[in-house]
Image (tube, grey):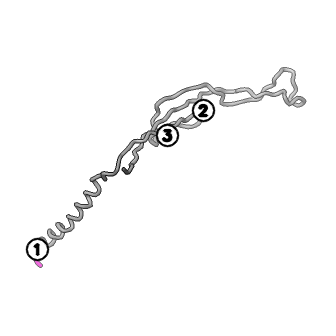
Amino acid sequence: MNKTNLFLMSCIASLVGGCALINKVEEVFIPDENTVEMKETKKKTISITCSQGKIKDHTEKGWKVIGTEEKEVPCKWKTKKAKRNCNPKKDKGCLITVPDEYGKEIIYFLEKESLIDKRK
């Protein structure tokens, strides 16, 4: 076979194979008429108390902060005598638990949109 025949045969082969490829491309790029694309909005609330936890973990997953709320809350507790003269070894009701350190509780209101494919 000479070079001309080889070139002609490769052109014919690509034309024949190309038709099947065009059909595959149409299947990929032309959406199905029976499919309806809808958006779903998910909402959730996250509470981070005394700087334990990070909102970054949620924002990296696509959640957006739409609002916050802050409160002061006790972070650590301690036991203390209820009265000056009480003896904890003799009287069990002598000790009470009181807040030792205070911190902030931040409540985050999060929202995330996602696409849903539904068939008609």
Q: Looking at this rendering, what residue extends furthest in the right direction?
A: 90
Looking at the rendered structure, the kind of residue marked 3 is: His
In percent of the image, x 56 and y 30: which residue is there? Answer: 106
Which of the pair 93/26 is nearer the observer? 26
- Per the image, the residue denoted by label 1 is 3
In percent of the image, x 63 and y 27: which residue is there? Answer: 73
Give the crowd class for mark 1: few <14, some 14-19, many >=20 residues within 10 Å: few
In percent of the image, x 17 and y 66: which residue is there? Answer: 15
Please tell me which of labels 1 and 2 falls first in the chain. 1
Please tell me which of labels 1 and 3 falls first in the chain. 1
Q: Distance between the residues labelled 2 and 3?
A: 16 Å
Question: Seen in the image, is 90 located left or right of residue 24?
Answer: right
Pair 1/3: label in front: 3
| Magenta stretch holds residue 97 | no
Q: Residue 47's image quarter?
A: top right
Q: Are marks 1 and 2 in contact (CB under 8 Å)?
A: no
Looking at the rendered structure, the kind of residue marked 1 is: Lys
- Per the image, the residue denoted by label 3 is 58
Give the crowd class for mark 3: few <14, some 14-19, many >=20 residues within 10 Å: few
Q: Position of residue 16 (x, y in %)?
A: 18, 68
Question: In the drawing, what numbered circle is on residue 103?
Answer: none
Q: What element carries label 1?
A: helix
Question: Seen in the image, is 103 located left or right of residue 84?
Answer: left
Q: How far apart are marks 1 and 2 (CA)?
A: 78 Å
Magenta span covers which residues? 1-5
Question: Is 113 placed above or below 99 here?
Answer: below
Q: Residue 98's image quarter?
A: top right
Q: Position of residue 72 (x, y in %)?
A: 61, 25
Q: Where is residue 55 in the image (x, y as percent from the top left)?
A: 51, 36
Give the crowd class for mark 2: few <14, some 14-19, many >=20 residues within 10 Å: some
- Per the image, the residue denoted by label 2 is 49
Looking at the rendered structure, the kind of residue marked 2 is: Thr
